[in-house]
Image (cartoon, rainbow, N blue to C red):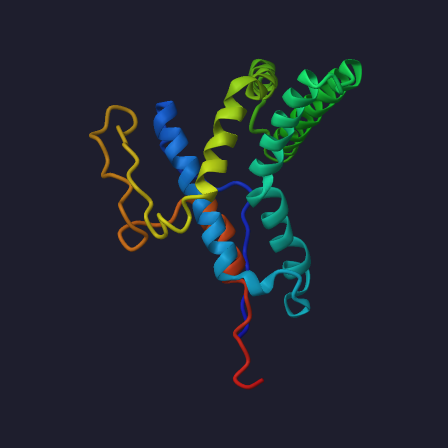
Amino acid sequence: MPYRILFTPDPICWTEVPDSMKILRGQRNRWHRGLWETLWTHREMLFNPRYGRLGFLAVPYFFFFEALGPVVELAGYVLLVVSYFLHVLFPEFAVLFLILSILYGMLLSQMAVGIETLLLSRYPRTRDRVILVVAALLEFFGYRQVLTFERFLAMFQVHRKRGQWGTMVRTGMMGQHPAAPFGTSSSESGVPSVAAGAATIAASRPAPPATR
């Protein structure tokens, strides 16, 4: 069955972001559970030559870097603390490695922003760019750890909360009336955006052969 995937670099849309940490954590929990559900549903695509680059690059990336990312990150925090108390930690190296990892994360964020700035002039003011740099730095001190832990918990809730997306309180934008809740099931509302993004994998799958 022939298909074509289109992409626009400058979509025009409005979205309402969570206005509290509790709602934000619930949102990221839904996203990560949706990612795991998508990967499990289409698990036969992993390293499957039939799907080409999708099976050897896209799906493995989502599995090893996105789905398992919270496990690796939290394990690193735990090992860092344990190594310190066991006196097997080399402090100078640990500090340099920490600084390098933070700078690398900031670099990735700024590269994404820089590409948009070069192609679309989305952030023309210097003040906006400075704010983005500061935000990319502050992300590593508390904010990232909270969301990583929430994604880690979501991994153990996939089976129990399968197809249950909970609710997301919406207050509306620009003085509008509160919008309807996010929904309580995948049949009542769309799956979370990250999960839907991961589900793009399924959209590009060729139809299975009639015979084997």
| Residue drawn at x 30%, y 27% as measured from the top left | 173
Q: Nearer the viewer, residue 77 or 137?
A: 77
User: Dividing the picture into quarters, in which one does residue 55 lie?
Assistant: bottom right
Looking at the image, residue 168 sits to the left or right of residue 60; the answer is left
| Residue drawn at x 30%, y 41% as measured from the top left | 166
> Residue 134, how many percent across, how many down?
59, 15
Residue 204 appearing in the image: yes
Residue 116 appearing in the image: no
Note whether 7 is above or below 167 in the view shown.
below
Q: Nearer the viewer, residue 162 or 116?
A: 162
Q: How many marks?
A: 0
> Residue 126, how many percent across, how many down?
61, 15
Q: Residue furthest front?
A: 86
Looking at the image, residue 48 sits to the left or right of residue 178; the answer is right
Note whether 9 is above or below 18 in the view shown.
below
| Residue drawn at x 63%, y 49% as measured from the top left | 61
> Residue 150, how many percent across, how many down?
45, 33
Note whether 47 is above or below 108 in the view shown.
below
Q: Residue furthest left?
A: 177
| Residue drawn at x 44%, y 36% as measured from the top left | 28
Looking at the image, residue 23 sits to the left or right of residue 66; the answer is left
Q: Nearer the viewer, residue 138 or 46?
A: 46
User: Dividing the picture into quarters, in which one does residue 18 lie?
Assistant: top left
> Residue 161, how many percent across, how many down?
35, 48
Q: From the image, which quarter does the C terminus lie in?
A: bottom right
